[in-house]
Image (tube, rainbow, N blue to C red):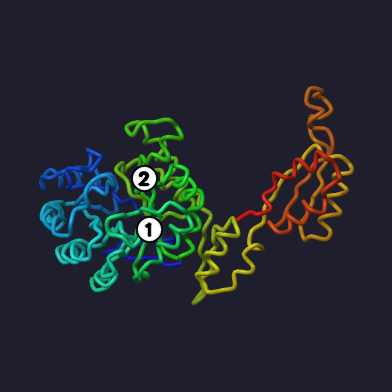
Amino acid sequence: MRNVEAAGLGIGPDHPPRIMGVLNVSSESPYDPSVYDDPGEAAAYVDEELIGEGADIVDVGLESANKDLDVLSAEGELARLDTAVETLESTTGDAVWSIETRYHEVADEALSRGFDMVNDICGFADPEMPRVCQEHDAAVSKMASPPDLERPGAIEDVDEIYEALAMNGFTDKTIVDPAFGGWSAAKTHADDRETFHRLREFAGYGRPILVSINRKSFLKTIAGRSTEEALPVSLAATAMAVERGANVIRTHDVAETRDAARIGDTFAASTTHRGGTVTVRELDVRTPREARRHLDRLEATTDIAAAATVTTYELTGLSSAAVAALESATQTTGATFARGGPEAGASDRPDRQASRSGSRGLLIGTAAELGAVVEAAAGASDALDEAIQAIDTDRE
């Protein structure tokens, strides 16, 4: 697993989550609190609301990435760069400065004039972008996108998002971004939620992960909140994202997001131990698909991915025949069934006795092992047959 350095700032699994605050110098940007076209006012906003509230990185957008607006050319972005540079030079706080662009010409000019890193929203659709970033020894965030400079983030399927991140390769300092948000008309809230659900998979590239989920529709619609009301929703998702492996959180709400990220980081599962030249890192792998991503990265056989994760199910209300069937099935499949004692409260709660009487236990195994148990135990009782259909034997 790789760490990245951006102008001396460590980013990755060996460092705290980093907060990327947003400044837009484009009047068409949708979130008014972050939009400034006067360098003095922009610098004050950065010092007070971004760096002053704990932002590690300031990300400057030269145009709105709204899919319904015309795409600004490289020349158009360069015409706005003076405002961004003057803002940078007018601030007093200490932070890493990132330029959001899809064009290598803009990245080259910005890096030459004081910016530290690049946020490429088209994911190296400009094939010269990696070269420019490497020549400047600059970190670059690479957002999953098709090979089209006018369609940033326009991918819906999670597997295709993952594969798109490999387009035109990586630099030594690449950070990956799975492109949350309505980047295309075809992308649904369900698509974004599936990507978030599978966020741990993106650690499979072995590179830091950036997420931009602040007040996004796929989150606020869960709670029925407007954009103005959506901060609590964003904060809950931020803690979850960091716990699932996100290393950089892009946000308009710096102070609150920083606190949420700290909570997620405190309870994250990954740990690292070093002894001389040997490093041992615990990976947060919970599905065979997540294991497969890491095996691919290490160029190891993926045949063992199905055996990399174990799932535990609690079964209650089991008849004697069901218990016997499960015990018999697990003797030959590699799974384990641990029978428990009588269910507490079954004898003194007549209203619940019908649903809770009988035996209970834990069924433990890999997806393949559990699938074999379901097949071997079939027919022991109608109730067991119906209940164990809920066991995900095709778990990916």
Q: Which residue is mark 2?
A: 185
Q: How far from the left and from the top, in percent, is residue 4?
A: 36, 65
Q: How far from the left and from the top, in percent, is residue 361?
A: 78, 45
Identify the residue at horizontal 37%, vertical 46% (top origin).
181
Q: Amino acid at mark 1?
A: Ala
Identify the residue at horizontal 39%, vertical 66% (top origin).
3
Q: Could you give the CA–CA distance between mark 2 and mark 1, rounded to whole angstroms?
A: 16 Å
Q: How far from the left and from the top, in percent, is residue 290?
A: 55, 59
Q: Is residue 363 left or right of residue 226?
A: right
Q: Is residue 28 left or right of residue 197?
A: left
Q: Is residue 134 left or right of residue 365?
A: left
Residue 60: tell me if it is visible: yes
**Against 297, is 62 above or below?**
above
Identify the residue at horizontal 16%, vertical 56% (top origin).
77
**Dot placed on the residue nearer the N-terminal end, 2 or 1:** 1
Q: Which residue is mark 1?
A: 144
Q: Amino acid at mark 2?
A: Ala
Q: In which quadrant will I find the C terminus?
A: bottom right
